Each structure stands twice: as structure tokens, then as C-alpha cells.
Amino acid sequence: MALAHILGLDHIVVTVRDLDAAAEAWRRLGFTVSPRGTHSPHLGSANYTIVFGCDYIELLGVLTPTEHLKPTIEFLKTREGIERAAFTTDDAAAGVEELRARGIAPLGPVHFGRPVELPGGGVGEARFNVFRWPVDEAPGGLRIFACQHLTRDTVWIPELQAHANGATRLVRLEILSADPAAAAAHLSRLIDEPVSSTPDGHLVPSGGGRADFLFYDEATFRRLYPAGVRAGAAAEGAVAAVVATGDPAGAGDVPAALANGVILRLVAEA
């Protein structure tokens, strides 16, 4: 039975070493980037967001090393790129209990917030409750957590949802693995969604009609993306994000070297 309090992919976290430079790089790619936000001190991080219709991309940087950020700091020792994926939850506390009932020991819930510059002037606050699957439960090297938005209007601001490249939503997150079948089965167990085989690998839906996860091997990765696009991507783990665009002229591949280690494939909406 599917998890009652997991409602599909909420956002992906692109962890970077120079947060302001990353925001400028993604602006050059045609994305509208939010003002910089600083998380609650016990987290020690700051971010920019790239907001779509029902999901978003988060650019995350470390301000102060904290216990919470230990896995992120380790990640940055070897690469930038997609470090985590977040699912939407309607009730973080209930989601924690649901996982515990299935024999999984989640971390949290944790409450935090960040100030938000509002388009009409003034400052609001985005507030969240989150919980994490155990750090060692990382399918294909991708850590996962769940996010309950307590103030959605401070994240999904209409002025931030219009992008010069026409981007509208996340379609798929692609994970490169030496054993994609096992990695897909791992995620399937953690979120209780089925695995299906496709010509390109093993697909796991995130639920709720949101973006899918596709796990594939090195041969498929090389077939899908030419060398110039792959250059700068990780040797394993989450390597690519497929984003829908309403502007056919904006469709195409963005090399990993231009997007902090993330291959971006923009595909025209049908």
C-alpha cells in the first residue's frame, strides 16, 4: 500500500560550493532565481530556489558547518550536483510514524524557516517541517527526505514561476548506477511505489503524478547524452534532471559543466 503522507517529488537539492555564483549561472540558463534565503541557524545553510508549477530546484550552499550538514559537507569534498531529493508530505509527524511502522527509522521531524523577500516589498517567512530517511538508505547514492510546507505562498510566488526558457515542471530525475535494477528496487521499497522496466532503464514514480526517477547504467548514460554534455557530471548518483518547457525553442540539453554538475534536458510539453 502506498505511503499515505508522501505526495510525490517536491524538489531536488543541487548542492554547490559558491552559492551566489551558482545562482548567476542558472540565471544565464534562462531560469528565474529567487532572492537568497538563509535557513535557521541550527541548519547552517542558505539557498536560492527555481520554482515551477508544483515543484522546484533548490540551489544549496553551506554557511556554517553543523551536525545537520555533515553529509552535505562530505558530498562537496568530491563534487557539486544533485545531492538529495525531497518528497512533499502533508504531515511530517504522521509521515515519520508511517515509516516507523514499516521498520524504517527516520530522522525528524525538524522545524525550520527562512526569510523571504516579497515582490511587493517587505519580508515574509517560509516555514517547513521535514524528516529524512536514514542516511544509509540512499538509492543509487541519492539521499531522500520529505518536506511539509507550512507557508506555501512564500515559496510558490507567481513572479518566480515565469522563466525565460519556458520551464514549467520537473519531469524526471536520472540516476547513474552500477546496478540500476537494485537501486530502483531500493527506492521502490523506501517509498512503496512500483518499478517498471523501460528501454532506458528502471523507472520508479514519485507518486501524485509528479516527476519520476529513472535508474540506468553507464552504457545508457553514454547513449542518451554526448560526451560534451556529460563532461562535468558525476561518475555515479543523480546526474541529470529533465525539465518540461512550454517554449519549444527552449528545448535541448544543457551540459553538466554549465549547471554545477547537473545535466539539464529541457523537453517541450506535448
Image (tube, rainbow, N blue to C red):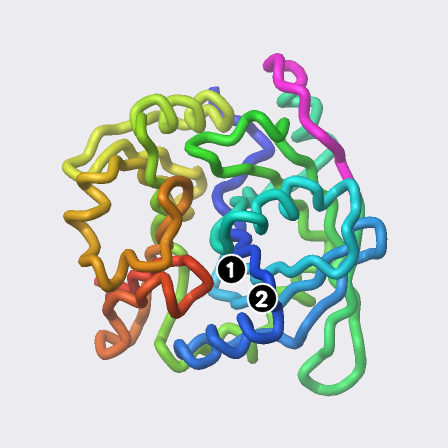
Q: Tell me the amino acid under the disc marked 2.
A: Thr
* Magenta stretch, residue numbers: 100-110
Apparent side of residue 140 relative to residue 89 in the rendered image (left or right): left
**Residue 230 screen position, x and y as percent:** 28, 56
Q: Residues within 10 Å of mark 2 (few under 14, many from 20)?
A: many
Vertical arrangement, residue 3 with respect to residue 144, above or below: above
- Kindly indicate whether the residue at mark 1 contacts the one at mark 2 (C-beta within 8 angstroms): yes
Q: Quadrant of the C terminus?
A: bottom left
Considering depth in this image, is 151 or 9 the residue closer to the camera? Answer: 9
Image point 74% across, 71% down: which residue? 116
Decide whether residue 102 is among the magenta residues. yes
Apparent side of residue 196 relative to residue 105 in the rendered image (left or right): left
Q: Residue lying furthest right in this view?
A: 41
- In three-dimensional space, the C-alpha distance between marks 2 and 1, rounded to whole angstroms, equals 7 Å
Which quadrant holds residue 120? bottom right
Q: Which residue is mark 2?
A: 49
Q: Earlier in the sequence, mark 2 or mark 1?
A: 2
Image point 42% across, 47% down: which residue? 210
Q: Which residue is mark 1?
A: 56
Q: Tell me the amino acid under the disc marked 1.
A: Tyr
**Residue 93 screen position, x and y as percent:** 74, 32
Apparent side of residue 123 relative to residue 62 in the rendered image (left or right): right
Decide whether residue 35 is among the magenta residues. no
Image point 33% across, 56% down: which residue? 242
Considering depth in this image, is 170 or 136 the residue closer to the camera? Answer: 136
